[in-house]
Amino acid sequence: MVENENLSSLITIVVVTSPIQSNPSTELLDRCLSSIIRTWPQLAECPKVIAADGCRECAPGKNRKRVFGKADAATIHRYHMFLDTLNARPWLTVNRPRPIDELSTEWSGFAITLQKAIEDHVTTPLVFVTPHDYELEDESLVDVTIDRLARAILDSSKERRVNYVGLPNAKTLTFHKRHNIALEGLETILLRGDPAISLIPLGLWKENPHLASVQTYRDFVFGENGLHRFKRGHFIEDTLGQQMLQVLKSTHEDKQSCFNSFGTYLLQSKAPCTHHINGISYVETKERACRGYSLAKDFEIQRSEAAVEFVRRMNEH
């Protein structure tokens, strides 16, 4: 097993963020980060990188919501304030987008923003990647320790290569059934222990919260000899991921060997292990209360309060 005290040299947490209407509030991102540490306290000492995408200014009234890397001046200004707040936290590394002019910055999209962050700031063999608007459900992961998932990747063999372990949300729990043709005949990996953990084949590379090999990111996902060359605005799942599925669908002989070159697995679980918050429309909890919106009562309030407490502890550490 991986020793807890060594996790900081094995895993880097990378959160990909971009302009949203709740900026300059950091509540959404703080909820994301605090859920990771609440689930796996051993990761508190691991490097934490914020991969920040850019945004170009559009004419007032032309684009009220951020679409394809464009937003109005007020939205971008709030985003810069948000990034300034994160920069002031000594326990975070913020990979800011390259400035173009006084307000606009280089827009890359999820895939290239993540690639730049990995190239510039990740020195560990593993990376835990998540978009900024996901929370981990610690109750669903109570028997799943991060060191066992890390060891599954680090100790996997060429014949049963594990490069990626995704955490399921409500939709991906049914992924295998929906893509049974592509995944037919592929074998589940059993991680022995108490309790045993099963990893089921996942035929694509999703952006949803996952632990992955950094070398595989560099060689397979972003490498020159990979299946896909990313362009500005691309997501990994919508491009490379779909090509992976097509390869598996068209492979009829020795499909397992073909899949082993991907090595993408999903943690088997009876319940969702992640919760999508929807960052584009997110409104800070206290603002929703002021507007008279209905809240999920204890759930929303507790998560936002936990995020505040998490940041306080990290700042004082």
Image (cartoon, rainbow, N blue to C red):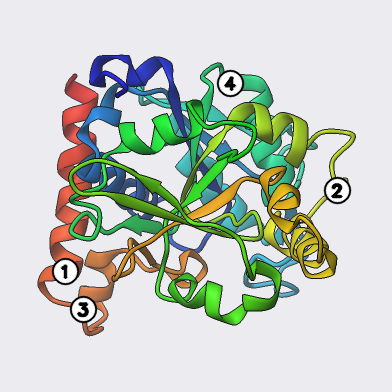
Residue occupied by mark 2: 227
Compute the Cα span from label 4 to label 3.
Answer: 37 Å
Question: Closer to the observer: label 2 or label 1?
Answer: 2
Mark 1 and mark 3 residues within 8 Å of each other at the beta carbon: no
Residue occupied by mark 3: 295
Residue occupied by mark 4: 121
Name the image quarter holding the N terminus.
top left
Compute the Cα span from label 2 to label 4.
Answer: 24 Å
Residue occupied by mark 1: 299
Left or right relative to 312: residue 13 = right
Compute the Cα span from label 1 to label 3.
Answer: 8 Å
Sort mark 4 into few (<14), some (14-19) or many (20+) by Cα contacts within 10 Å: some
Sort mark 1 into few (<14), some (14-19) or many (20+) by Cα contacts within 10 Å: few
Of label 3 and label 2, which has the lower sequence position? 2
Residue 105 image-quadrant placement: top right
Q: At 70% from the left edge and 54% from the top edge, which residue is drawn?
A: 236
Q: At 64% from the left edge and 72% from the top edge, which residue is drawn?
A: 64
Name the image quarter holding the C terminus.
top left
Q: At 28% from the left edge and 69% from the top edge, which residue is drawn?
A: 287
The amino acid at mark 2 is Leu
Of label 2 and label 1, which has the lower sequence position? 2
Of label 2 and label 4, which has the lower sequence position? 4
SS type, badge 2? loop
The amino acid at mark 4 is His
Compute the Cα span from label 2 to label 1.
Answer: 41 Å
SS type, badge 4? helix
The amino acid at mark 3 is Leu
